[in-house]
Image: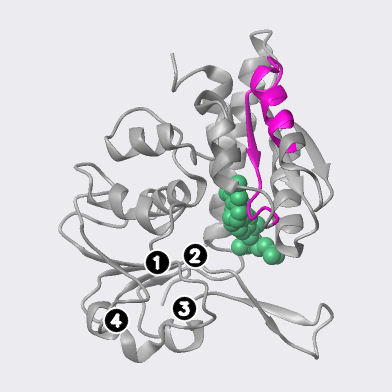
């Protein structure tokens, strides 16, 4: 078993980004600028957005955090999005999800100018992604591709089983890994809550990508020897004896799967780390005007 070390990869990528920032400044340019909108006090969102802001600081990007209470009106939020679309000092921005129930997430996503949509959630970016056109890739799938590249994991002709079909992870990573490219050229199966015999699919997989949101759902007896196990889940489970009162775990049962896996991502310290740096990579692309020319 080998650990796929997300923290180390993220450090390597941050060092590369910091170098790019130095070059931009040497040429008299300003550093890339990411803005993040955070609504309410969803505990995990606080942590994720803080990690994004800190990551910007580490590489020398400018960042702006816009916070609003959970009862913010939809109109005010749409107004903030409109202002960020207009603000020439902001290269890219995100609205952290989930949003409170009274706000229509789709409406907010559609209001974002695709050219500044560094999350890659706008249908224009999703459509471009699906057609292999220049676009901002959603951060988690982009992070998974980056892991595959940097660990030189072979994907051509491999059986990939993606568990979960969300718009932000399961569906896009399935499209990306079946594209005619590297990483890609894999045979991809998408499994979900209505899949009849999940273990039967999982046991055939060379690579498993788990994005279901159920703690330690995939166990060792469901996977084959040598599998590459990529765990997107970040679940908080009660742990009364710990300082925080919870512990983090993935959708893959690390204890039973890791002895059979050739490579496995830990939680925390795996995919989540790459999600954050992928957002920075997109922000740099936005600043350079690389996608929409
Ligand atoms: N708009 N909403 C928008 N964009 C996104 O890209 C996200 N996502 C997902 C949730 N909502 C979003 C994130 O930012 C998930 N996500 C995210 C970001 C960071 C981390 C995990 C998920 C992360 O930093 N994970 C750490 C542990 C964090 C902890 O201690 O809780 C890790 O090592 O995995």
For the residue labelled by badge 4, is the local secondary structure a helix, a strand or a loop? helix
Dot label at residue 164:
1
Query: Which quadrant would residue 91 be assigned to in this image?
Result: top right
Describe the element under mark 2 as helix, strand or loop.
loop
Assess whether residue 105 is covered by the magenta stretch.
no
Residue topped by disc 4: 198
Q: Is residue 199 left or right of residue 245?
A: left
Task: Please report the residue visible at 71 percent of the width from the left and 33 percent of the height from the top.
Answer: 35
Q: Marks 2 and 4, how far apart in space?
A: 17 Å
Percent position of residue 146, x then y: 43, 48
Q: CA distance from mark 3 to mark 1?
A: 13 Å
Q: Residue at x 44, y 19 (%)?
A: 292
- Residue at position x 82%, y 77% from top? 244
Q: Label 1 neighbourhood size at 10 Å, few (<14), some (14-19), many (20+)?
A: many
Q: Which residues are magenta?
A: 77-100
Number of callouts in the render?
4
- CA distance separating discs 2 and 1: 10 Å
Q: Foreground: 18 or 252? A: 252
Rendering colour mode: one colour
2 vs 4, front mark: 4
Dividing the picture into quadrants, the one containing residue 286 is: top right
| Pair 4/3: label in front | 4
| Comparing labels 3 and 1, the label whose residue is closer to the camera | 1
Residue 269 visible at all: yes
Residue 252 badge:
3
Where disc 1 sits, the SS reads loop
The numbered mark at residue 232 is 2
Choose the circle earlier in sequence order: 4 or 3.
4
């Amino acid at each position: 078993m080998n650990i796929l070390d997300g923290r180390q990869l993220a450090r390597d990528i941050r060092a590369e980004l910091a170098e790019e920032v130095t070059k931009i400044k040497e040429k008299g340019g300003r550093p890339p600028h990411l803005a993040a909108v955070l609504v309410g006090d969803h505990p995990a969102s606080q942590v994720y957005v803080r990690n994004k802001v800190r990551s910007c600081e580490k590489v020398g990007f400018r960042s702006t955090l816009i916070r609003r209470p959970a009862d913010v009106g939809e109109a005010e939020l749409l107004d903030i999005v409109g202002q960020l679309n207009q603000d020439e000092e902001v290269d890219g921005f995100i609205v952290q999800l989930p949003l409170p129930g009274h706000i229509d997430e789709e409406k907010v996503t559609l209001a974002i100018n695709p050219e500044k949509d560094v999350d890659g959630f706008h249908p224009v970016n999703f459509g471009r992604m699906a057609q292999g056109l220049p676009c901002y890739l959603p951060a988690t799938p982009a992070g998974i591709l980056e892991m595959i590249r940097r660990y030189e994991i072979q994907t051509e002709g491999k059986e990939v089983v993606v568990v979960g079909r969300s718009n932000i992870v399961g569906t896009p990573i399935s499209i990306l890994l079946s594209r005619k490219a590297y990483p890609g050229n894999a045979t991809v199966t998408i499994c979900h809550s209505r899949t009849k015999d999940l273990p039967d699919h999982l046991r055939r997989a060379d690579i498993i990508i788990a994005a279901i949101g159920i703690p330690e759902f995939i166990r060792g007896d469901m996977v084959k020897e040598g599998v590459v196990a990529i765990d997107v889940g970040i679940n908080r489970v009660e742990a009364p004896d710990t300082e925080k009162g919870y512990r983090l775990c993935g959708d893959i049962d690390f204890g039973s799967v890791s002895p059979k896996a050739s490579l496995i991502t830990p939680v925390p310290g795996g995919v989540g780390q790459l999600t954050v740096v992928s957002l920075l990579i997109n922000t740099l692309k936005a600043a350079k005007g690389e996608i929409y020319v």
